[in-house]
Image (spheres, rainbow, N blue to C red):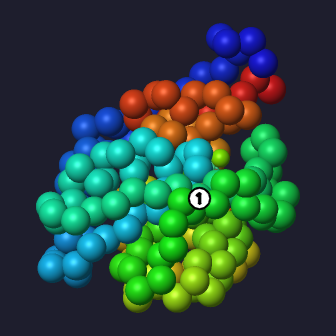
């Protein structure tokens, strides 16, 4: 797809994203006062949300780690989830916050929650910038949701279409040429 062969209409502005993350950060911190929090970003889509979220969490002891999964090609889920990059260290006994860009079918978070639970964290919660509940194939608990959106394909703020457009500072609706 040539670089100019798409239109991206702003759905959620950078300002709205930042305001919501500030709220989520304060909310999350209340539940973990006095304890370490290990934030696990799901590569690659969550990197921008994770970077802003950890700065909004007013706790002295926040660690960051990443887990990589491959589940998507183009705009449709393959339903196949595979770990492509694992955590750098054990999460046994830790308070873990799994940080995702978007919960769509729910298959990725469902798989990751099962996988991480086998490692015996003290607690395991999920933060997702976006949630498309109308697309759910499995129900997953999302403890912190940035925005609930309709069934539209979005890009920007970490979310990609075939690897591109992650660098937009806002979330946009992708309109591909007919
Ligand atoms: P799920 O397993 O169907 O919930 O999909 C989760 C992954 O699909 C997310 O981490 C995204 O990488 C990708 N995804 C789902 N919907 C969108 C979208 O609208 N735009 C970009 N990526 C998406
Ligand atoms: Mg993706």
Which residue occupies 51% across, 40% down?
Answer: 158
Q: Is 27 placed left or right of 111 in the picture? A: left
| Residue 176 place in picture, x, y as percent | 72, 28
Which residue occupies 73% across, 34% down?
Answer: 162
Given residues 45 and 19, the one toward you in this image is 45
How many neighbours does mark 1 have within 10 angstroms: few (below 14), some (14-19), or many (20 or more)?
some
Given residues 50 and 171, the one toward you in this image is 50
Dividing the image into 4 quarters, which one contains the N terminus?
top right
Image quarter for residue 44?
top right
Q: Is 79 placed left or right of 21 in the picture? A: right
| Residue 18 place in picture, x, y as percent | 26, 45
Image quarter for residue 163?
top right
**Placement of 141 over or under 85, stated as above or below:** below
Which residue occupies 41% across, 71% down?
Answer: 97
Label 1: state its secondary structure.
strand
Given residues 30 and 37, the one toward you in this image is 37
Q: Which residue lies furthest to the front in this view?
A: 89
**Placement of 14 over or under 50, stated as above or below:** above
Q: Is mark 1 within 8 Å of ligand 1?
A: no
Dividing the image into 4 quarters, which one contains the C terminus?
top right
Q: Can residue 43 be seen in this view?
A: yes
Q: Is 107 placed left or right of 147 in the picture? A: right
| Residue 83 place in picture, x, y as percent | 73, 61
Which residue occupies 59% across, 58% down?
Answer: 67
Q: Is 28 placed left or right of 100 in the picture? A: left
Q: Can residue 131 be seen in this view?
A: no
Which residue is tagged 1?
A: 67
Total numbered circles: 1
């Amino acid at each position: 797809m040539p670089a100019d062969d798409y239109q991206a209409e702003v759905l959620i502005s950078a300002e709205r994203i930042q305001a919501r993350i500030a709220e989520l950060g304060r909310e999350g911190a209340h539940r973990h006062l006095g304890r370490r929090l290990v934030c696990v970003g799901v590569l690659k889509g969550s990197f921008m949300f994770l970077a802003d979220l950890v700065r909004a969490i007013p706790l002295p002891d926040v660690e960051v780690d990443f887990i990589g999964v491959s589940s998507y090609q183009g705009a449709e889920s393959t339903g196949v989830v595979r770990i492509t990059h694992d955590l750098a260290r054990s999460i046994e006994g830790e308070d873990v916050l799994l940080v995702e860009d978007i919960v769509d079918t729910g298959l990725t978070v469902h798989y990751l929650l099962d996988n991480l639970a086998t490692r015996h964290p003290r607690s395991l919660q999920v933060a997702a910038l976006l949630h498309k509940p109308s697309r759910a194939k499995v129900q997953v608990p999302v403890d912190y949701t940035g925005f609930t959106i309709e069934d539209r394909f979005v890009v920007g703020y970490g979310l990609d279409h075939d690897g591109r457009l992650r660098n937009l500072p806002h979330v946009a609706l992708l309109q591909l040429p007919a």
